[in-house]
Structures are given as C-alpha cells and as structure tokens.
Amino acid sequence: MQHQRGEGKIGCIVSMLVLGTLGATAYKAVPIYYANSELIDACDFAASDASKRPIEVIDREVRQKAKELGIIEALTDKNAIRISKSGGEGGGTCTIVLHYRQTIDFYGVYKWTLETDKRITKPIFENIS
C-alpha cells in the first residue's frame, strides 16, 4: 500500500502567496483610489451647487476636502485644482478641473503613479421661478 503525503502542499503555498500579495497590494492601493473618488464626488457636488457661492468659497471647500482625504499633491501644486464660472445672467456653467498625480509605494518594491485628469462641468441655474 502506497501513501501519498504532501502532494497538495505546494499548490496551497502558492495560492497563499498569491492571496497575500493581492491583499497587501489592495491595502496600499484601495485607500488612494477611494480618496481620489471621494474628491471627484465632492467637486461634482460643489459644481452643482455653484450658483449660491463665489469661486473662492468653492475653491476653499474643495481644497479642504483634499486635505481631509490626504491628497497632498492636489494642495502643493496651485494648478492642480482650477475652478471657473462662465455665462451671463440667468445661467452659465461652473467648471472644476482636477489635474494631479499620486504615487502609490508598494513596500519599496514598485511605485505606481495614479494620474487624475478630470473636468467637471455643471450648469448654473439662477432666478428660476
């Protein structure tokens, strides 16, 4: 009678290594992607609500949100966040442009740069009865 011992150990070890690597990668990448998505959502909301507030207030709120989320690159470069309003009486548009990079350091083994280049344009409706 022959005994087969240890046949499945190599496959289990490889699977555990792959799973561990994926988990460690997600641990570093997910918070940065989440923060980036949150800032884009905050800009979308700010642009939608632009008819009630001046550009300076919107800029301050967006930069404060970036600071809360830890997106330092958006705060150090003055051109990373640009806000403008256009149009005449009764309407127009509010445009927020995000252009910055974030580097994700995967434990000193690899560095990945996430580049955000997003333009959000929303209509401004004023004096709607």
Image (cartoon, grey):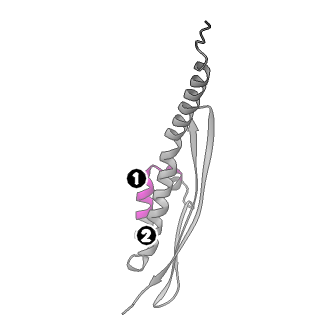
Secondary structure at badge 2 equals helix
Give the residue pinned by disc 2. 46
Distance from the alpha carbon under mark 1 to that under mark 2: 16 Å
Q: Does the magenta stretch include residue 65?
A: yes
Quarter of the picture containing the C terminus is bottom left
Quarter of the picture containing the N terminus is top right
Q: Which residue lies furthest to the front in this view?
A: 1
* Residue stretch in magenta: 61-73
Quarter where residue 119 is shown? bottom right
Give the residue pinned by disc 1. 68
The mark tally for this picture is 2
| Image point (49%, 62%), residue name | 40
| Image point (63%, 36%), residue name | 110
Secondary structure at badge 1 equals helix
| Image point (50%, 48%), residue name | 32
Q: Is residue 30 above or below residue 61?
A: above
Q: Which mark is residue 108?
A: none
Q: Which residue lies furthest to the bottom in this view?
A: 129
| Image point (53%, 31%), residue name | 20
In the image, 115: left or right of 84?
Answer: right
Q: Which one is in front, 127 or 64?
A: 127
Residue 71 % position (x, y):
49, 51
**Amino acid under disc 2:** Ala
Q: Is residue 107 above or below residue 2?
A: below
**Amino acid under disc 1:** Glu
Residue 105 % position (x, y):
57, 38
Q: Do the residues labelled 1 and 2 touch (CB within 8 Å)?
A: no
